[in-house]
Image (cartoon, rainbow, N blue to C red):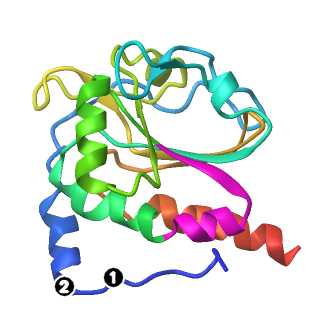
Amino acid sequence: MLGRFFPLKNTNQLKTINSARCFGSIKKTSKKAKFLIGTRLPNTDLYTSSPKDVIKPADLFSKRKSVLFSVPGAFVPGCSHGHIPEYLENVERFKTEGYTVIACLSVNDPYVMTAWGKSVDPDRKLLMLSDPKAEFTKAIGMELDCTSLLGDIRSKRYSLLIDDGVVTHVSQEPDDSGLSCLLCIQKMKRIQQSTIDR
C-alpha cells in the first residue's frame, strides 16, 4: 500500500540528500499556496518538448487522477539523484491507485526539461513539464527567489494530488531549504493510506 514508508537503501543516498542542501540562502517569495484544496489549477500555458508544444492544465489533468510535483531546477544533483528516482520507483504503485499521469514541473525552458528527462527517465515514465516564465508557479503561490544561486525565480518543492483538474492534496517542503527528497512521496502515501483505511 502507498501508506508504507520506504527506507533509504544505502548511505550513499543519505549522503546525496544531505549534500544537496544548497538552497539555504534563498529568499522566500510567498508564505503559502494561493489556492485551496478543492479548487481548480490555473490554466496557464505549460510546455513539453519545445516552445511549440503547449499544453493546458485543464486539458492535461481533465477526467483523470494525477500527481504533479515540482523541483527548483533540472539537472540539480539532489533532484536528479534523490527526488526523481523516488517517483520513478513508485510509478506503478501510483498507477495501481488510479493515478494515470505523474508529471514533473520546473521553471526551465522546454529544451532543458526534455534533455533532463532523457537523462533521468529514459523510459519516459514521467511527464516533464516546462514553466519557463514561472506563470503557473506564481499563480499557485509556489515561486521561490533563487536569483542569488540560480539566477531567477524558481519553484518550491511541492507535490499535488489532482482529480479531474481539482487539487485534492498539497504537500510542500516545510523549510524550502534542504532537499527532503522523500517528503512528498511519504505524504502522498499517508493520504492514500488514510483513504484506504476509511
Q: What count of labels does the image hold?
A: 2
Eyeballing the image, is 90 above or below 27?
A: below
Q: Where is residue 26 in the image (x, y as percent from the top left)?
A: 21, 34
Quarter of the figure with residue 35: top right
**As rendered, which of 177 and 89 lies closer to the eye?**
89
Q: Position of residue 172 (x, y in %)?
A: 48, 47
Q: Position of residue 24 (x, y in %)?
A: 18, 45
Residue 97 in view, yes or no = yes
Mark 2 to mark 1 CA distance (whole Å) = 8 Å
Q: Give the left or right position of residue 193, taking residue 139 as reference.
A: right
Where is the C terminus found, in terms of image quarters?
bottom right
Residue placed under numbered mark 2 in the picture:
11
Question: Is residue 47 part of the magenta span, yes or no?
Answer: no
Q: Is mark 1 on a helix, strand or loop?
A: loop
**As rendered, which of 115 and 158 lies closer to the eye?**
115
Residue placed under numbered mark 1 in the picture:
8
Eyeballing the image, is 193 above or below 160?
A: below
| Residue type, mark 1 in image | Leu
State the mark number for residue 172: none
Residue 145 in view, yes or no = no
| Residue type, mark 2 in image | Thr
Q: Residue at x 52, y 80 (%)?
A: 5
Q: Residue at x 32, y 27 (%)?
A: 107
Quarter of the figure with residue 21: bottom left
Proximity of marks 2 and 1: CB atoms separated by less than 8 Å: yes
Q: Give the left or right position of residue 125, taking residue 4 as reference.
A: left
Quarter of the figure with residue 113: top left
What are the residue bounds of the magenta stretch? 90-103
Q: Which residue is drawn at 48% across and 21% down?
A: 46
Q: Residue at x 40, y 84 (%)?
A: 7
Where is the N terminus found, in terms of image quarters?
bottom right
Question: Is residue 91 part of the magenta span, yes or no?
Answer: yes
